[in-house]
Image: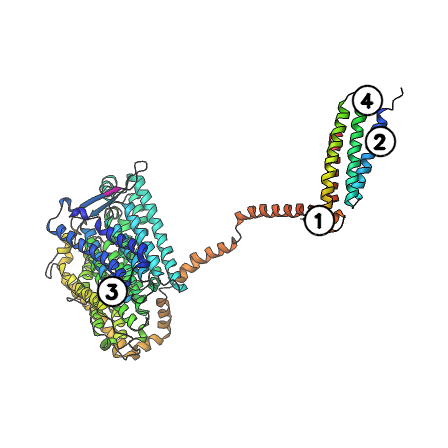
């Protein structure tokens, strides 16, 4: 069975290849059969392999399969080899399973689109690249998958390429993530320089042996890898591409910009956790970036009017939580939140997509309203997802994953009260903006006419994801409440456990109650401001300071403007200066000189015979004179 | 027997050559230009004869026969061209034959 590991990434690639080669000749149902079937089969293989992995754990907790050696240059011989341990198992499960549901949903969502085949080809290519990324056994193969998902992200954001602003958003995403990728590539070069290999396991063991904690190279490399992770995961300071990435079709937003690709940064940090533990400063930076990002994005989400942009900012914010968890060393809590987040964020995006499709591509929340009765199935699933995002206590999965992060941010050995306060504040804001979204969209008076109600293929993935968003949390319960540790036990062999400050342990329940109360308070405030007393909302919005703040947050803290002034404008200025390439001027001088000579000589060819004769005579006279000179 | 000094003969040849050259340059009628070329050829031939007589060598006369032969060939080709020119342009003005200028 473990010999079939290569099949999991190969299947989506095969689907993409088939769709690209035969796409034009296939009928719609055949395209969806290939597109969905390949990912579905990969999901089935993942489940089978995961079942075997869990029941009959392999030696060392790893399935490794080398397919072939990629190349060999000067002792550097990376292979196309796959490495399945508990961490990658969680990731491939989420990628294939959530990916399959989203593909299924897309067959209904994209049914009317003329680029149906192209869409599924890109989506399959994306799933394949992402699987290569998380299954890679060496960092070079990981980088291949990394760039592959970057490419697919570009293709899918700009999927409706006839609108210029979609192309602009696609280019923005590609270029901004490229900044991080460059840092990461430099980090890989340095790793190769020190260890002579990019094999992840060898690097992890050798780094511990050769570097003490806080070693200079470990710090530098950890920061460079962090650069790559920050770019891909949309964290400060490279977060500006993610809200604009909502230009793509909604299933793309669900799959790439919420559930899987943007968490590649989380995966990279968890995978290279040994390096980050050797560089405590870098790890603390991860936590601080996470804490700051989750707050910034949360405040921005509060002010958005576009349903998908609220979700985009909430994605940035939730990945901030994952970074916070990784930064304080709560590795398994971060990965747990990744999994739960993938469920509920995919659910929220797909439900939002169902609304947007039914309302004829209307995305402005303030033009929706009153959808509760019109589309009950979407309402209830969306509500479950929103409750999970807002971490409503006890019943939702989001509560358990987020509470674990908050608790470890405070009580973990690397946690501190500031990180905890930021996380708690973030949880409060999350509850407000989530239920602001719910109340504005589904309650109040109806403002639009429903075009066509969503079909079964749209509702089915929503229901499955809603169930997962609820029961997903019960595989990991805090030890004073049920004490189920299935998930962290699974990850134990891969990711180290975090020691907890014992003096706080007895008070854990107090912090849990606090977290629960905070999220309930957020929901209550949203209820009061947006549903009970809309005039209060208007009052707040119309005061001068609030309006300025609203504008500031609405534009995402002005980062676009800042980067525009800092990087784009100087670059454009330099480019205009050098519009007529300085280097080129030498060559254009040569051509104009040749042309001038040509024009001059062409004058002499006037077709008058005596003129030519004169030329001969003058030439002969000159030669005679020269030969007669002493 | 009194022989003419070689310089006289060469001077005559030079004068003939220059006359031919000048008339080639100033004439526009293409037949006159052909005649001018003939004069120049014969001037060169005269120079060969004079030089051959001066050094009592046969090569001067041999060269002259070559030049005569070549001139005959040249005239036949030249007249054929002139006929074609006249046929096409209805004039013997060489300046009119500048259709391929530039």
Query: How far separated are the C-alphas under marks 3 and 2?
Result: 109 Å
**Location of residue A285 in the rendering, given as x and y in whole percent from the top left corner:** 29, 53
| Of labels 3 and 2, the one closer to you | 2
| Of labels 3 and 1, the one closer to you | 1
Q: Residue furthest right?
A: B2
Whether discs 1 and 2 lie on one chain: the answer is yes
What chain does mark 1 sit on?
B
What chain does mark 4 sit on?
B
Q: What's the magenta region?
A: A67-76
Depth order, front residue of B71/A564: B71
**Location of residue A66 in the rendering, given as x and y in whole percent from the top left corner:** 22, 43
Whether discs 3 and 2 lie on one chain: the answer is no
The residue beneath circle 2 is: B12
A443 relative to A336, above or below: below
Reading the chain from its start, which is encountered first: label 4 or label 2?
Answer: 2
Q: Is residue A187 magenta?
A: no
Could you tell whether A125 is left or right of B64 in the image? left
Whether discs 3 and 4 lie on one chain: the answer is no
């Amino acid at each position: 069975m473990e010999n079939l590991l290569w099949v999991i990434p190969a299947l989506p690639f095969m689907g993409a290849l088939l769709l690209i080669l035969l796409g034009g000749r296939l009928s719609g149902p055949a395209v969806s059969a290939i597109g969905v079937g390949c990912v579905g089969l990969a999901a089935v293989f993942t489940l089978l392999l995961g079942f075997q992995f869990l029941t009959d754990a392999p030696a060392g907790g790893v399935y490794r399969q080398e397919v072939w050696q990629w190349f060999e240059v000067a002792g550097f011989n990376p292979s196309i080899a796959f490495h399945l341990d508990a961490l990658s198992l969680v990731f491939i499960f989420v990628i294939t399973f959530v990916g399959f549901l989203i593909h299924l949903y897309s067959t209904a969502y994209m049914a009317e689109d003329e680029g149906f085949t192209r869409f599924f080809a890109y989506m399959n290519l994306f799933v394949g690249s992402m699987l290569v990324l998380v299954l890679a056994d060496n960092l070079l193969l990981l980088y291949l998958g990394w760039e592959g998902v970057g490419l697919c992200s570009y293709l899918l954001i700009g999927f409706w390429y006839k609108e210029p602003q979609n192309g602009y958003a696609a280019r923005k995403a590609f270029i901004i993530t490229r900044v991080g990728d460059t840092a990461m590539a430099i980090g890989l070069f340095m790793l190769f320089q020190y260890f002579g290999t990019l094999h992840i396991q060898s690097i992890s063991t050798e780094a511990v042996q050769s570097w003490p904690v806080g070693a200079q190279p470990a710090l530098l490399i950890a920061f460079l890898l962090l650069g790559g992770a920050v770019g891909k995961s949309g964290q400060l300071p490279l977060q500006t591409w993610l809200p604009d990435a909502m230009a793509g079709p909604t299933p793309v937003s669900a799959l790439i910009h919420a559930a899987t690709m943007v968490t590649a940064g989380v995966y990279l940090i968890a995978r290279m956790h040994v390096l980050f533990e050797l560089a405590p400063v870098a790890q603390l930076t991860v936590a601080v970036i996470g804490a700051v990002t989750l707050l910034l994005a949360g405040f921005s989400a509060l002010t958005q009017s576009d349903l998908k942009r609220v979700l985009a900012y909430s994605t940035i914010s939730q990945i901030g939580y994952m970074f916070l968890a990784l930064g304080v060393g709560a590795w398994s809590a971060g990965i747990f939140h990744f999994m739960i987040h993938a469920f509920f964020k995919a659910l929220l995006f797909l439900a939002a997509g169902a609304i947007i499709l039914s309302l004829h591509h209307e995305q402005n929340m303030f033009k929706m309203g009153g959808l509760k009765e019109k589309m009950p199935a979407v309402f209830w699933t969306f509500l479950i997802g929103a409750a999970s995002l807002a971490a409503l206590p006890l019943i939702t999965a989001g509560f358990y994953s987020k509470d674990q992060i908050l608790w470890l941010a405070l009580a973990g050995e690397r946690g501190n009260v500031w990180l905890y306060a930021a996380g708690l504040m973030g949880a409060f804001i999350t509850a407000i903006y989530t239920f602001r979204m719910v109340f504005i969209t589904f309650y109040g008076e109806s403002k639009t006419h429903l075009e066509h109600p969503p079909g079964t293929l749209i509702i089915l993935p929503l229901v499955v994801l809603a169930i997962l968003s609820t029961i997903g949390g019960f595989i990991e319960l805090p030890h004073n409440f049920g004490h189920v540790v299935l998930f962290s036990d699974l990850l134990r062999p891969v990711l180290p456990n975090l020691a907890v400050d014992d003096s706080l342990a007895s008070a854990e329940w107090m912090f849990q109650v606090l977290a629960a109360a905070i999220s309930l308070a957020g929901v209550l405030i949203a209820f009061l401001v947006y549903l009970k007393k809309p005039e209060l909302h208007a009052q707040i919005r119309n005061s001068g300071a609030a309006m300025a703040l609203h504008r500031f947050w609405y534009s995402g803290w002005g980062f676009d403007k800042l980067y525009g002034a800092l990087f784009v404008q100087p670059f454009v200025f330099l480019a205009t200066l050098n519009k007529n390439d300085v280097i080129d001027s030498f060559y254009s001088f040569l051509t104009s000189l040749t042309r001038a000579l040509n024009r001059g000589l062409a004058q002499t060819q006037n077709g008058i015979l005596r003129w030519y004769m004169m030329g001969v005579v003058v030439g002969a006279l000159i030669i005679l004179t020269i030969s007669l000179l002493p | 027997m009194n022989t003419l000094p070689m310089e006289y003969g060469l001077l005559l040849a030079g004068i003939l050559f220059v006359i031919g050259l000048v008339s080639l340059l100033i004439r526009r009628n293409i037949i006159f230009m052909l005649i001018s070329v003939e004069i120049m050829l014969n001037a060169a031939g005269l120079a060969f004869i004079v030089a051959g007589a001066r050094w009592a060598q046969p090569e001067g006369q041999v060269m002259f026969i070559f030049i005569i032969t070549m001139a005959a060939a040249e005239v036949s080709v030249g007249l054929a061209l002139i006929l074609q020119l006249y046929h096409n342009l209805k004039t013997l003005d060489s300046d009119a034959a500048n259709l391929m200028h530039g």
